[in-house]
Amino acid sequence: MIVLSPEWTAVLYLIAAVCFILALKGLSSPKTARRGNLLGAFGAVLAMVVVFLSTELDNIALILGVIALGTVIAVPASRLVKMTQMPQLVALFNGVGGGAAALVALLELPLVADELGAVIAVAFTVLVGAVSFSGSAITFAKLQELMPTRPIVFPGAPVVISLVALGSLASAVWLVLTADATASYVLLALGTALGVLIVLPVGGADVPIVISLLNAFTGLTVAASGLVLGNTLLLVAGTLVGASGTILTRAMASAMGRSVAGILFGAFRGGSTAGSTAQSDRPVRSSSAEDVAILLGYAQRVIVVPGYGLAVAQAQHTMAELASTLEAKGIEVVFGIHPVAGRMPGHMNVLLAEANVPYEVLSEMDEVNPQFKNADVALVVGANDVVNPAAKTTPGSPIYGMPILDVAAARQVVFLKRSMRPGFAGIENDLLFEPQTTLLFGDAKDSLTKVLTAVKNL
C-alpha cells in the first residue's frame, strides 16, 4: 500500500542524497569519520524505507526475509572482521554491488526494450557490473591468500584479453540494437570472464589499487541502473561512489608512482609488483630488544614508521604504549604515515586511532619527510616497500618512481621484521644493509613488548 506521495518521496530521497554527500565529507578526516559513517547509514536506511512506502511491491515476505538473512550474516561479519582484512571486505562489497546492479538491469530489460537510452544503460550496467563482480572476487581471493597474490600470466594472455574485450563490446552493440535477452546473457558471461582476465595479471601491492578502481566501476553501474529504473537517488549515490572511487584510485596510483595502465597490464612487460617470497642471504646487523631500547631511550626525537606488519601482528596498542612511555621520558615521538602503509589510504590512521594514538602526532609523507634528517632514530615497524630506496635509485625496479618515506636520512634506523623475506613488491630493501640500520627479528607485537619492557627499566 502506497503511503507517500511523489512529492514527499522526492523530498525524502533528496534528504538521503544529502546524507550521502555529508557522509563522504565526514570520511575525509579521522575526526569526523564516525559521524560520516552514521550519516551514510542513516541515508541508506531512509532510502530503503521510502522504497517500501512509495512503491507497490510484490513478494513483500520474500523481500523482508532476504533483508533479515543479510542482516544475520552482516552483523557478526562486521564485528569479527579484522582491521587488516578491510581491503578484502571492501572488495566483497564492490563485487556484490556490481553483480546486483547487473542482475537488476537484466530483469528490467523486457520492460525498457522500446527505449533506446534505457537499453544502452542496461548494456553498460550488465557489462561493467559483471566486470566489477568477477574482478572483485579475484582481488578478494588474492588478498585472502586463497590464490597466489603474484601476477598470473599465461601464454597468449594479451590476445585472449583483447578478444574477450572485443567480444564484450560486440555483444553490447548487439544488445543495444536488438534488446534481445540472449545478447544480454552473452554480454554477462563475457563481462564476467573479462573481469577475471583483467585482474589475474595484477599482483602484490597493486591489488588494493585495483579494488579501488573496481569500486569506481560499481558506482558507475549503480548510477546507470538508476537511469534504467528511473531512480534519481541511485543515480546520485552511484555517481558519488564512482567519482570518489576514481579519485581514490588516482591518489593510490600516485602514491605508488604508477599509472593505472601500468598497474593493470604491467605484468606483461615485467613492470608489476611480483610478490616474491625469496629470502636474501646478504649479511645484516641485528640487535636485541635491550639494545634497541637504549637507542630509543637516549634519543631526543623518534619517528615511527608503521606498516602492514604492525597491523597483521595487532601491535598497534603496544606501539602506542611505547610511544607514550618515550614521551613521558621527554622524547619527541612522531608517526610517519605513507598513503598506502596499510594497503589502502587511511587504513593505518584508523588502526592507530583504534589504539588512541593522538591525531596530532600522525604526519603524512610530505609533512614528515623533511623531519627525518633531524631524527635520532627512525623506528620501522612492519613496513618495507614504502621505505625502500630502490624507488629512487633503481630504474627498472617494480617500485621505481614510487614516493617513499625518507627513512634513510635518519641518524639511526631500527627495522622490526619477522624475517628477511621481501615486502609485498617482492624485492630486496637496500636500506636493510646500510651501516646505520639495525634489525630486530620477530613478531612485531612480541618485539615491541620486549622493547617496551626494556625502555621502562632504563
Image (tube, helix red, strand yellow):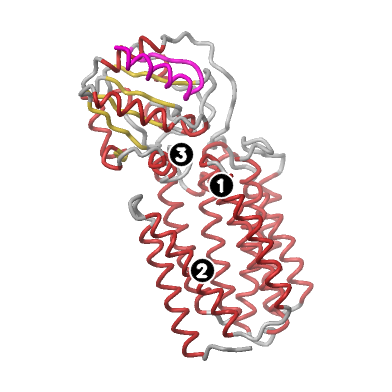
For the point 59% across and 42% down, the residue is 202
Give the CA separation, mark 2 to mark 1. Answer: 33 Å
Give the CA separation, mark 1 to mark 3. Answer: 21 Å
Per the image, the residue denoted by label 3 is: 342
Q: In the image, 42: left or right of 116?
A: left
Marker count (numbered): 3
Classify mark 2: residues with Cα within 10 Å, few (<14), some (14-19) or many (20+).
some
Q: In terms of depth relative to the viewer, which is nearer, 232 or 247? A: 232
Q: In the image, 222: left or right of 307?
A: right
Per the image, the residue denoted by label 1 is: 264
Mark 3 or 2 closer to N-term?
2
List x then y, in percent, for residue 239: 47, 68
List x then y, in percent, for residue 404: 36, 33
Q: In the image, 1: left or right of 86?
A: right
Amino acid type, callout 2: Ala
For the point 38% across and 13% down, the residue is 438
Amino acid type, callout 1: Leu
List x then y, in percent, for residue 392: 37, 30
Indicate which label's residue lies in the foreground, 1 or 3.
Answer: 3
Per the image, the residue denoted by label 2 is: 44
Image quadrant holding the C terminus, namely top left
Amino acid type, callout 3: Gly
Q: In which quarter of the image is residue 57?
A: bottom right
In magenta, the rendered stretch is: 436-458
